[in-house]
């Protein structure tokens, strides 16, 4: 039963949109009321007031989704022969993109679960957004192995079920582990995200300006009324979900790396893969968080809630995980030499100087050289520069997967097994299409649901002592 | 006000409710209400106020226990499934490895544990909270919209043996409720 229109209140919020700098997670002057109005207000914004960046971005991404639909339709009609894969390079773009997308999802879980357990204050403004990013990235990732199946309509054969053929999947295979890891990861991410949303959906229900919106959010809020007894169980459930997601996120990319490490191909059969895949996943995930959040915070004038503190902290995590990845590369190279295995050392030499050598050089440039600029505080606080570095890291991490998947397969043990891989237009269309799908989902998410956790922002207000202080100035 | 008392006797009121502006105020009020002997109480807050649940006498919840049980079911269920597939339903000799090859069962067993625990966390939290519940008497109070925004509500329920409508309302006024209202059932 709203008496005032939240969207007008958004524009008239007493709190100035100022970035309080790297020391603070929230601009001064915010109250319980003002954070609620500000975050809910972006959802209740009238269509004509929607930021231009949103409209243009959503239209472009929708156009790209159609490219995906077209590419997938052709794939279904003609089969995986339209892609560049061949024998011996059976894993082309599909598996590169699968690993890349899953990795991007990991930052969402890291932010919402691990930083929650570590009680990091800068987690709050970006956790909801990062969790949504996880969900959509996992959706993109899950498409690829299924499209790669050849007969994707039989994907349910991957699940153990009592079929009339009395055949069962092989649970000793890492590919079957992947099925369980990725489906569990998708489900648990959805549960975690939804549990986090319930109190905010109640807020949306209570402040929605129109009856149909009240009903829509009301159904999703499940009748949440903020009873302290409910909060008590809620907090316990949320804490446990965070505790469960933490080993889950580590296990998922570990299992993804087992797809490679358990095999015998030179360049894949190495024990450093699990930790270095997990670090790489978090690296690319934080890069994607920054890529998305920097434009959105400026379109929606959210600099007072997503502050320099969030950007700088994310940049630092990116730098740290980037160094772990660099350590992984060094160890790979070292062991290729130190093992004395001619196949391993040839593999590494070929990786650096072979026909795909330029991808390795670009990878080192993007993943190791350029991100070192983040050591400088000036760079970390230069928002456009951080955005550019985040794009570079995204590209670098994609190249890393290209180098691992494709370059290793082109040079197997016997020269008679050597081959070449050139992606086709359909490979690229499918990949770009999932990018469009991902971005469109993110756009719809920020339009329809509170992209920042409102109730946790209220806790930030409470702990910051701004709870019952009047706004900084009266208009 | 005999009218209200009559309503109370017919259980037509859900309770007496007071509105507070800050977490500190509601904590102090809840403490006094508990000391005054009220036991059937609930508080409605826009975020989890630390210590408030304990103050109104709600000390323990069983979500963690449920999740533990869910996790154990996940582990045993996952492992049994794999054992059944590889040893009983579809015994398949791969390079003379034993049929009961437990090390390769670990990843899937682990994922099953996480999946079942997480689903149990969601379902048990909702079930113990009695959600989804689209209707509740507190929604009848017009000011209650702000419980999901910036106000803190304490409600003494009519099911409390000590509850007398007038007394409860007076008590809530006394402990500093900025607004005091009756919640129709």
Image: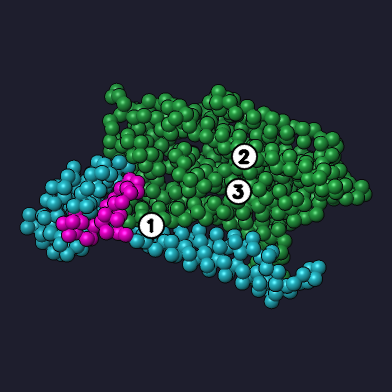
Magenta range is B33-59
Find the distance from the CA under tag 3 to the CA under tag 2: 21 Å
**Secondary structure state at the residue bearing disc 1:** helix
Kindly report which numbered mark, 1 or 3, lies closer to the viewer in this rendering: 1
Kindly report which numbered mark, 3 or 2, lies closer to the viewer in this rendering: 2
Chain of the residue under label 3: A
Residue B123 position in % (x across, y down): 45, 61
Q: Residue at x 18, y 56 (%)?
A: B35
Q: Earlier in the sequence, mark 1 or mark 2?
A: 1
Q: Colour of chain A?
A: green
Tags 3 and 2 both on a single chain: yes
Circle 2 packing at 10 Å, graded few (<14), some (14-19), many (20+), is many
| Residue where numbered disc 1 is placed | A233
**Residue B40 is a magenta residue:** yes
| Residue where numbered disc 2 is placed | A321
Residue A115 position in % (x across, y down): 50, 44
Q: Residue at x 60, y 28 (%)?
A: A375
Can residue A71 be seen in this snapshot?
A: no
Can residue B74 be seen in this snapshot?
A: yes
Q: Colour of chain B?
A: cyan
Q: Residue furthest right?
A: A416
């Amino acid at each position: 039963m709203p008496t005032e229109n939240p969207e007008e209140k958004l524009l008239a919020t007493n709190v100035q949109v100022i970035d309080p700098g790297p020391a603070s997670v929230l601009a001064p002057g915010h109250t319980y009321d003002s954070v609620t109005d500000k975050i809910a207000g972006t959802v209740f914004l009238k269509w004509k007031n929607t930021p231009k960046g949103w409209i243009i971005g959503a239209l472009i991404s929708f156009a790209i989704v159609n490219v995906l639909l077209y590419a997938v339709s052709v794939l279904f009609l003609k089969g995986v022969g339209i892609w560049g894969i061949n024998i011996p390079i059976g894993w082309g773009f599909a598996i590169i993109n699968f690993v890349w997308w899953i990795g991007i999802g990991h930052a969402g879980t890291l932010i919402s679960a691990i930083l929650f357990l570590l009680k990091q204050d800068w987690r709050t403004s970006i956790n909801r957004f990062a969790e949504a990013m996880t969900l959509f990235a996992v959706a993109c990732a899950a498409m690829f192995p299924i499209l790669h199946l050849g007969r994707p309509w039989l994907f349910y054969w991957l699940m153990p079920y009592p079929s009339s053929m009395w055949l069962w999947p092989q649970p000793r295979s890492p590919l079957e582990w992947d099925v369980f890891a990725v489906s569990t990861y998708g489900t648990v991410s959805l549960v975690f995200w939804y549990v986090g949303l319930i109190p905010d959906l109640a807020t949306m229900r209570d402040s929605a300006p129109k009856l149909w919106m009240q009903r829509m959010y009301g159904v999703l809020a499940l009748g949440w009324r903020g009873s302290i007894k409910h909060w008590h169980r809620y907090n316990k459930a949320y804490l446990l979900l965070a505790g469960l997601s933490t080993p889950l996120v580590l296990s998922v990319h570990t299992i993804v790396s087992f797809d490679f490490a358990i095999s015998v191909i030179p360049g894949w059969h190495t024990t450093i893969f699990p930790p270095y895949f997990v670090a790489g996943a978090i690296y690319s995930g934080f890069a994607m968080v920054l890529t998305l959040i920097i434009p959105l915070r400026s379109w929606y004038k959210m600099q007072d809630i997503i502050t320099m503190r969030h950007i700088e902290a994310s940049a630092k995590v990116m730098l740290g995980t980037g160094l772990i990845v660099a350590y992984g590369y060094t160890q790979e190279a070292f062991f290729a030499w130190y093992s004395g295995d001619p196949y391993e050392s040839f593999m590494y030499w070929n990786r650096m100087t072979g026909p795909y050598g330029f991808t390795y050089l670009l990878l080192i440039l993007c993943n190791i050289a350029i991100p070192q600029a983040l050591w400088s505080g000036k760079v970390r606080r230069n928002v456009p520069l951080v955005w550019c570095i985040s794009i570079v890291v995204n590209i670098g991490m994609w190249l890393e997967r290209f180098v691992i998947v494709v370059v290793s397969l082109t040079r197997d043990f016997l020269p008679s097994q050597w081959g070449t891989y050139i992606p086709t237009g359909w490979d690229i269309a499918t990949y770009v299409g999932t990018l469009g799908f991902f971005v469109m989902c993110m756009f719809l998410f920020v339009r329809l649901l509170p992209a920042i956790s409102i109730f946790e922002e209220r806790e930030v207000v409470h702990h910051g002592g701004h709870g019952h202080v009047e706004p900084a100035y009266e208009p | 006000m005999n009218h209200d008392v009559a309503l109370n006797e017919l259980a037509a009121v859900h309770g007496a409710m007071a509105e507070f502006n800050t977490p500190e105020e509601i904590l102090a009020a809840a403490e006094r209400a508990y000391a005054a002997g009220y036991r059937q109480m609930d508080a409605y807050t826009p975020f989890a106020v630390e210590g408030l649940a304990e103050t109104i006498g709600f000390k323990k919840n069983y979500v963690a226990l449920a999740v533990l049980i869910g996790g154990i079911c996940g582990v045993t269920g996952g492992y049994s499934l794999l054992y059944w597939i590889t040893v009983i339903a579809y015994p398949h000799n791969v390079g003379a490895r034993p049929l009961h090859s437990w090390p390769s069962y670990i990843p899937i067993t682990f994922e099953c544990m996480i999946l079942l625990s997480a689903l149990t966390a969601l379902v048990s939290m909702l079930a113990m909270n009695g959600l989804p519940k689209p209707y509740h008497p507190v929604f009848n109070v017009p000011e209650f919209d702000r419980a999901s925004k910036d106000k803190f509500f304490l409600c003494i329920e009519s099911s409390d043996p000590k509850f007398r409508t007038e007394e409860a309302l007076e008590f809530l006024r006394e402990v500093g409720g900025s607004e005091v209202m009756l919640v129709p059932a």
